[in-house]
Image (spheres, helix red, strand yellow):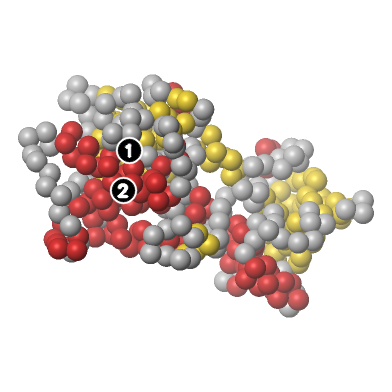
Amino acid sequence: MIETDIIIIGAGPVGLFTVFEAGLVKLKCHLIDSLPQPGGQLTEIYPKKPIYDIPGYPEVMAGELVDKLLEQASPFKPGFTLGESAVTIEETDDDQFIVTTNKGTEHKAPVIMIAGGLGVFEPRKPPVEKLADYEENGVEYIIRDPNIYQGKRVVVAGGGDSALDWSIYLVENNIAKELSLVHRRSSFRGHLDSVQKVMDLADKGDIQLITEAEVVGLNGNGVLNSVEIKHKDGSQITKETDHFIPLFGLKPTLGPIATWGLEIEKNAIKVDTRDYSTNRPGIYAIGDVNTYEGKLKLILCGFHEGTIAVQSAFARIHPDKKNVLKYTTVNGVNGFE
């Protein structure tokens, strides 16, 4: 059982900043996220996309913002349960909550903050026959451990940042023995630097670039050994491979959140804008996962919501204490640890 002051469900930018705000009032946080690393969409979908509306940053790459948020939160030593989804929430007799994940990990705290962005992310799967038969047997939708591709033949499909960046990573770090990148168009949607790097690696023969084509079939006896690739002109080739990784992004769904007894409106959690609390006392919803009149789905709005929710959480956890607002410009950060 992992015990803390605040369980934060979702380790995206809003959840990470909330760790910092909680630390300023001496509240400990533990974050749960279904993705294998912190950062949410910023890390998983567009780490090299620029963001322009973060105060103090005229432009910041999404991945860099996550790094800065982790650095900002680090003095307060947050805990992480990554690669696991929060499935159930139970209330105890002593006004605490127990959150259990799909892998059975239990977490206990008097306050829960749901910062799940747009919800649980599920991979967008290509319409390839028998795709499910090879899941975990050569087909992966998310790269959790790059080392499993050491010395392997890999086919990556996709045209966005994730497909480009992982192709570059697996080649430049001498992990994949052979890497092919398949994309149904001739141009890519990813960051220009990544596109150019892939082109350069293709010119050197380090990446086999197959454009205007898509994977249409899989072969193997229980374990993947080749893929069928169909070109736009109708011609088809068989490509021997150990792994097929379709990286077509992730689609959000509320998932288990919808079963937690919260008031839901238009696939989001209704909150009281006084403190972003839900209809269940002790449970708050911050960031893109919540809804209220005038809601804007912006990271900076989520930062505000998390800040206000922490003040309310402090009053719930310490009803006999008065929280006097202290400015970091006066106390610094070390003064709050």
Q: Is residue 92 visible?
A: yes
**Image quarter of the C terminus:** bottom left
Residue 295, position in %: x, y?
Answer: 44, 38
In the rendered image, the residue lying farthest to the front is 294
Q: Mark 2 — residue? A: 18
Residue 186, position in %: x, y?
Answer: 79, 61
Residue at 32% x, 44% y is 306
Residue 194, position in %: x, y?
Answer: 63, 68
SS at mark 2 in the image: helix
Residue type, numbered disc 1: Met
Choose the circle earlier in sequence order: 2 or 1: 2
On residue 302, the disc is none
Residue at 22% x, 51% y is 23
Foreground: 81 or 138? 81
Residue at 92% x, 54% y is 233
Foreground: 195 or 218? 195
Q: How far is disc 2 from disc 1 in space, using C-alphas?
A: 9 Å
Relative to 144, is 55 on the left or the right?
left
**Residue 62, above or below 307:** below
Question: On the image, which quarter does residue 293 sit in?
Answer: top left
SS at mark 1 in the image: strand
Foreground: 268 or 12? 268
Q: Residues within 10 Å of mark 1 (few under 14, many from 20)?
A: many
Residues at circles 2 and 1 in contact by the CB criterion of under 8 Å: yes
Question: On the image, which quarter does residue 88 sit in?
Answer: top left
Q: Residues within 10 Å of mark 2 (few under 14, many from 20)?
A: many
Relative to 273, is 42 on the left or the right?
right
**Image quarter of the N terminus:** top left
Residue type, numbered disc 2: Thr
In the rendered image, the residue lying farthest to the bottom is 204
On residue 113, the disc is 1
